[in-house]
Structures are given as C-alpha cells and as structure tokens.
Amino acid sequence: MALGPRLDLRQTQSLVMTPQLQQAIRLLALSNLELESFIADAVADNPIIDLAREEGEERRDDAGEEALHEAVPDQATGDGEAALDIAGEMLDRDVDTGAGLGSGSGGGVVEGFDAIEAASDSAETLADHLHAQIGAGGGSATEQFIAHQLIDQLDEAGYLTLPLAEIAELLGVSVDQAEAGLRLVQALDPTGVGARDLAECIALQAIEADRYDPCMKVLIANLDLLARGNLAQLKRMCRVDDEDLADMIAELRGYDPKPGCSIGGDAAPPVVPDVFVRQGKAGGWAIALNRETLPRLVIDREYYTSLKTGCGKDKASRGWLGEKLADANWLVKALDQRQKTILKVAREIVRRQEGFFLKGVSALVPLTLRDVAETVGMHESTISRVTSNKFLNCGRGTFELKYFFSSGVAKAGGGEGEGASAEAVKAAIRTLIDAEEPDAILSDDTLVDLLKEKGFSLARRTVAKYREAIGLGSSVQRRRQKRLQGAR
C-alpha cells in the first residue's frame, strides 16, 4: 500500500475555555475586597470604563430595592435571574449574561447595614519599638551594636531563636560580648523579649516583678512538670504547701509567654461580609449584597464617541477601541451576573438553614453543594466558587457561606427527618464538656450516651473526632487542666 499525503475534513467537538469564561470563573471565586482590586485594575486598563457617581448609584438603588426586600420564597425561581453557571468543563460558546443593570454590583441596600471600618495599618513593629530604646538603657557602643543585630533576629513573639554562639561568630565578637548585648535587649520593654526559651521569658518577668525567689526559680525550671499536672512532685521540689503552690501558679498565669506579640505585628484583616441577612418585619428574610465595599462600573459612552471620532479611518485604532468596548460591555454584564448568582445561592442557603437563623447552631441541618446546585439549577463547581471567600452577616454574627454546608449524622432510634448537622453535634459536645465538674470528667463513652439522649446516634470514634476538631482534649487532658485551674 502506497503512502502519500491526503486532505480529510472532520467534524469534532472539543472542550475549550475562552478567555472570557476563564475570567468569569475568577470573578465568581473573588471576595468583595478582592473584586474591588480587580475593578481598579480594569478601570486603569480600559479608558472607557469608569466608576459610577453617587447620584447614579442612588437612582439604581431605588430600582433594585424592592426585589431584595422580599421574603425568601419556598423555592428559588429563575425569572430575570439567569445566573452565570460555569461548570468544570465548558464548551466554547457565548455566555448568556442576561439583561445588565449598567452596573457591576446588583442588589439593594438594606437599612441598618453599616459598612465595616478598615483596620489601621500604621502600627509600630516590635523591631522598631526595641530599636528606639537602644541608647537610653546605657551600654557601650559595641554592646549597642550587638543589641541592634540581636533585635533583628527576634521572632514575632520576641524570642531569640538562633544560638548566641552562632550570632557571635557571625558578628565577629566574643560570646561574652554577645551575652552583654543580649542582656541589654532583655532589659528593654516589653519585659521578656530576647529570651531563648519559655522558662527564660517567664524568669525575666518574675525578676522584673521581684518574685524570682528560690521557690519560684525551681517552679519555672520545671514547667514540664506543671504542664503534666504533677503538683505533688512540684510541692516537694519547691518545698511549699498547697496554698503557696497555688499562689505561685497564679503568679505564672499573669506573665505573658509571648511578650513580642503585644507590640506591632500585622493586624488581622477584618472580615467584610458579602451578604447581609435580616429578618423582615412582615416575615421572611431580607437579603442584600454589601455594596459599600464594591465600586460600580459604568461605560463612558460620551468618551467612547469622542475617541471613535478621533480615530477617523485608522482601522487599527478603531479595531482596538471596538475591543475595549466589547470588553467593557462583557465585564459589566459579568459582574452583574455574579451578584445575581451570589444572591440566588444565598437565598437558597437561608431557606434551607432557616432554623439556624432562628434558633442557632443546634438547628443546623445537613446540607451539601449538590443539594443547593440541584435546586438553583447550577453546577456543583459553581456553588463551590460562589461560596468560597464569601461571608454572610446576620443577627448571630458573620459566617463564611461554606459554614452552612456540612455532613449529617443519623438520629438516634432511626427517626424520620434530615438528621443533624455535624456543626450541631460539635456544639452539643462543647456544651456537655463545658458543664462537666472537675471531679466528674466525661469520657468519650459517656459523651456517646449523653448525645444519644439528645437524639444523636454516634460512634465513639466519631465523638473523639468531633471533640478534637473543636480543640477539646481527652478526658485525661481535661482532668489535668481542671486540676491546674483548681490550684489557682
């Protein structure tokens, strides 16, 4: 059989993600604060996109207010709310963006929803605080130089993690000189910085408080025994009675094991809710997007017209301007659809978890991404993106949208119903353990029986897993902790 070139015409289907779909996926996963940065970049890149003026925002708010103050319906509807549903695999096709509102942040503003204030980012760092004190505390020029170098080696808690001999070798000084520089650092405020371990940090604070007597010295040198709750051995080693040991332990509790954390450090960024939920006066729930943190986009048609006129017959310039207009139109519609999608998913979550908003965490029911996806007619991956990095604020606090999704446990006795959410079980375990007496610590087997009385059918290993997940120790660890608290 002879080999030769030939031309074939074949018709195939392939999975392709267009740049617009890739951008839409990123938009769904962004929080409001991240989206604000994205919009700022878009405005800087596209000359015909601009931020909406206050007057225009007020007019559009009035138009969208009524739709967002309605009670949550029994079943989500899709009228006028074509959501931007992007599955894990997408064909190369146009996105149905629906009718845009001329803005990238649909949704109304509910009265009483105040914007969260941004935290100040001008806090003084620990290193700055310590460097400023060098010189006032005396010491030779060499000691001050070493002290400055040691300060730069402290971690955020104020501890010196590198061996002093290694630092002395790097600086080309003797260990004795390094020790003198370290003493200069340890004399700075806050007391306890420059320590090489916890015992030295506590000892420095005890010395400052004039409480570093021989008994306290022995106690600080044996913090491992204190952590294990071996009070009898500590009494013999310190040669004190129960009352004196309790006073010494109470003194230790007043010291700061991480003194450096009290100065500077990066403040935790505030959690800004994306969705507000309030109970309506006439029943149902009022749901709205937080528009205070989200700039709104408009297309500057007048500027576009002037640019188009200036291009004349230059095809390259007119083509570039046409691309910018298409990008602007698509971005505005995509942002509008993003807000509609978030609202649609949030309404379904509120409808499903209404018991939580009325009664608290004990009323949470099992809920999966598939449950919501089937009801609102979206793909599970879309629900996952919508609920990632999004927060809901209600009368009970601020919660990530993913908080409302959890597995369930069966009801005791095999009763009918949806069972209970894992979060509800964790709350029940915490309540039981918080109420236990020091001389009657509950074992995991006992917790299983008590939870069964509350209607939760759980295996012992499941109870242990939930208990560890909420940061509660075993019965032995809790008994030791209660004993230490009793010695206060």
Image (tube, rainbow, N blue to C red):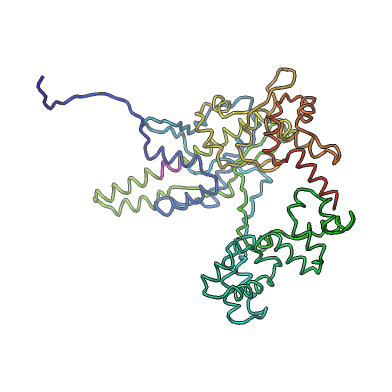
Where residue 340 appears, as percent x and y from the top left, is 53, 36
Image x and y of residue 435, in percent: 83, 38
> For this rendering, which residue is in front, 367 or 183?
183
Residue at 60% over, 64% down: 154
Q: Residue at x 31, y 48 (%)?
A: 320
Task: Check the image and report above or below for 453 versus 122.
Answer: above
**Please, is residue 212 above or below residue 408 in the view?**
below
> Image quadrant for the N terminus?
top left
Q: Answer with left or right where residue 310 lies relative to residue 357.
A: left
Where 285 sits versus 119, above or below? above
Whether the magenta-drawn stretch holds residue 12 is answered as no
Residue shown at 77%/40% (left/top)? 476
- Percent coordinates x, y for residue 217 in the rendering: 78, 63
The residue nearer to you, when weighing 187 against 398, is: 187
Which segment is the magenta one? 328-332
- Residue 152: image quadrant is bottom right
Q: Main secondary structure of the magenta part?
A: helix
From this viewpoint, which residue is outermost toward the left? Answer: 2
Q: In the image shown, does 424 or 180 lie closer to the viewer?
A: 180
The total of numbered circles placed on residues is 0
Closest to the observer, 343 or 112: 343
466 to the left or right of 49: right
Percent coordinates x, y for residue 76 in the rendering = 58, 27
At a point 35% along the width and 53% down the height, the residue shown is 306
Q: Is residue 278 positioned above or below 212 on the image?
A: above
